[in-house]
Amino acid sequence: MLPVDALGPDGEYRTSRRQIVTDTRGVPVVDLAAVPRLYITRSIAAQRRRAPLPAGQRAEALTRAAEVFAGETIAGLSYADYVELTCRIAGLPLAVARAGADVVAESLATAVDAVRAAQPAGSTLDWRDQPSGAVWARRGDVLAVHAPGNAPGVHGLWPQALALGYRVAVRPSRREPLTAHRVVTALRRAGFRDADAAYLPTDHVGADDVVRAADLALVYGGQDVADRYAADPSVFVNGPGRTKILITAEQDWREHLDVVVDSIAALGGMACVNATAVLYEGDAAPLADAIAERLADMPALPCTDPRAVLPTVPTGQAHALAAVLAGSAVGSTPILGADQVVADLGDGFAALRPAVHLLSGPTSALAVELPFPCVWVSPWSRADGIAPLRNTLLLTAITSDHDLLDRLLGEPTVTNLYRGDVATHYGAPNIPHDGFLADFLMRNKGFVAG
């Protein structure tokens, strides 16, 4: 097994308590540290005592870290080895794991540019730049990151906090512990100090300690995690996406089928930006059939196969997910139902085939999000209004109705709105995901030099 130790403010820390991480076949592959609670609080206290590096040094180190991350051997793994092992642990298709890792490298290189896109036009980062006005200042010193395990790409976001002068403490997921370790190691090799970025693998109790000990926290998880931290203004929760596509009646859905299917199936269907619901103003049955016909062609292969496009999980977990789907689908019409989701690949693991269900109208099923290509197709009418479209991270609206677009932009629970043939998983440094991270990390302070 590959030993992966903690990275604290005083360097590498090999703990006596360990966590065994298996791949989706159940084979042990990583011997992961599990830091105790006292070490967490002491580490974050030490991070808080360190002043940030000068802005120019931070920018140079982030650029260099991108090169180290993608080009050097870390923890005994080349970049290709790291991608392959991440694929095996997380069950991501190999091409998806590689694309996610590439996103991290690019995000490290562009972290400073991404932060600039969020900075208010009337503010400055340095009070010396103007005699009076607004200074864009940090809301704290240490950011905790309670990381998810569904994809490497999420680790491209939190380095923006380093660009702003935060120190960062990352608690990785056991489902994918390698990317965070590789990023933190790359940052240290590139010029950041040990106290600037820490890697603190721990159990669920310790994860709460990481969040509580820091000034601010970036937390990923399901609805239970979102509910737990919903009332805490110091925690920025990235919960379920419940991403949707709306096609209005004046549009020919056949002309947009490619972007619909891509939105559902790209990234293995595992991301919060994958479409989980498609609403059509008209008869949705032909659209559901067409989507199912496309998705049914996706091959069920081991995730390490270069042709793989579907996620894999242990066989028992696959059957459990199929059971959840079957329970959620009561009352709907299965086009690709729960009975065909589990594709047993032998050796104790299975691929998750796509699922498509047709609803008679917008129901609570539209909120069901599962970690594989799974979509609910429903008719929608003007009488339904925008209520079925609420609580959506990303909404692609294929419509020429400008009044409807105005209403959707004005709806607080629709976080991002894409118009026309834009896949829901599209992203760029200048486009906020759930707002800009800097919106949460920074505030404007008035400053006057007398």
Image: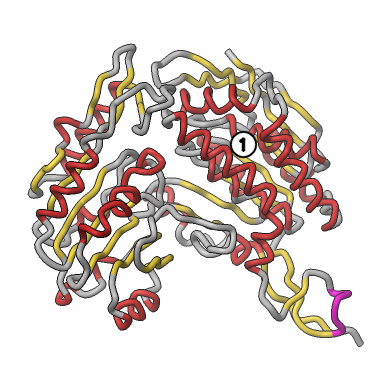
Residue 179: x and y in percent read: 59, 34
Is the residue 86 above or below the residue 359 in the image? above
**Where are the magenta residues, as a range?**
127-131
Horizontal side, residue 296 vs residue 346: left or right: left
- Residue drawn at (44%, 46%), measured in percent from left and top? 221
Q: Quadrant of residue 404?
A: bottom left
Q: Which residue is mark 1?
A: 180
Q: Residue at x 71, y 24 (%)?
A: 73
Q: Is residue 276 left or right of residue 168?
A: left
Q: Identify the residue at horizontal 34%, vertical 48% (top origin).
A: 262
**Residue drawn where x is 39% and y is 17% of the image:** 25
Q: Residue furthest bottom?
A: 450
Name the element at disc 1. helix
User: In this view of the protein, can residue 341 be seen by the observer?
Assistant: yes
Q: Magenta: predominant secondary structure element?
A: helix
The amino acid at mark 1 is Ala
Viewed as shown, does residue 165 lie left or right of 433?
Answer: right
Write down the quadrant of residue 345 in the picture: top left
